[in-house]
Amino acid sequence: MAPLRYSRTYHRFPLFYPVIFGGAPFVGEGILSNLSLMGCSVMCDREVLCGSDVRVSVLLPHQTPALSIDLGTIKWVQGCQFGVEFLRLPLEARQCLNRMLRIELIEFLKARSGRRESLELLNRGG
């Protein structure tokens, strides 16, 4: 039987913010390396356990309090990077996350649209 292919439901945006995370039996600091509506990846120098519950606080620039993910689960571990699926966020954190990702999506689409327009100009010779 062939293994099931894993695919994400939501686009992950490459963002880099400091994070503090904790679960039993670990606490650590790291850098968020990408973010979506339902999860993130974290780079750190600590060993974490796949399947563990974890709480994550993302330290955002010019914003307090931190973006707080009350409950997540570590879905994968690869070297010094791990992925977290968000299970429970307070309403304020969900709203903050939605605002952040909306801005990132707009910027992503602008950049993509700009590349497409540049290619069209090049193809037309203009």
Image (spheres, helix red, strand yellow):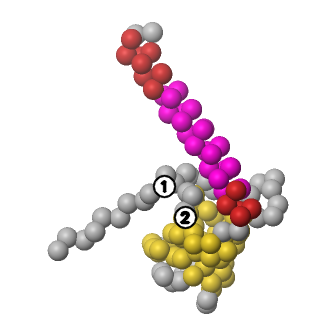
User: Given the image, on which type of amino acid does mark 2 rest?
Assistant: Gly
Is the stretch drawn in magenta largely helix, strand or loop?
helix
Quadrant containing the C terminus is top left
Image position of 119 with respect to 102: above or below: above
Using residue 81 as the reference point, say whether residue 56 is left or right of it.
right
**Disc 1 secondary structure class:** loop
Report the residue that reaches farthest toward the front: 91
Q: Residues within 10 Å of mark 2 (few under 14, many from 20)?
A: many
Name the residue located 65 percent from the left edge and 53 percent from the top edge: 98
Span of residues in magenta: 96-115
Using residue 75 as the reference point, say whether residue 58 is left or right of it.
right
Residue 47 visible in image: no
112 inside magenta stretch: yes
**Disc 2 secondary structure class:** strand
Image position of 75 with respect to 13: above or below: below
Name the residue located 44 percent from the left edge and 57 percent from the top edge: 9
**Residue contact between numbered discs 2 and 1, judged by CB atoms under 8 Å:** yes
Q: Residues within 10 Å of mark 1 (few under 14, many from 20)?
A: few
Number of residue marks: 2
> What is the x, y in percent for residue 63?
80, 56
Q: Quadrant of residue 27?
A: bottom right
Which residue carries the number 2 mark? 39
Residues at marks 2 and 1, CA–CA distance in whole angstroms: 9 Å
Report the residue that reaches farthest toward the left: 1
Using residue 83 as the reference point, say whether residue 66 is left or right of it.
right
Residue 31 visible in image: yes
Which residue carries the number 1 mark? 10
Image position of 87 with respect to 53: above or below: above
Viewer-side residue, 17 vs 2: 2
User: Given the image, on which type of amino acid does mark 1 rest?
Assistant: Tyr
Name the residue located 44 percent from the left edge and 15 percent from the top edge: 121
Using residue 22 as the reference point, say whether residue 35 is left or right of it.
left
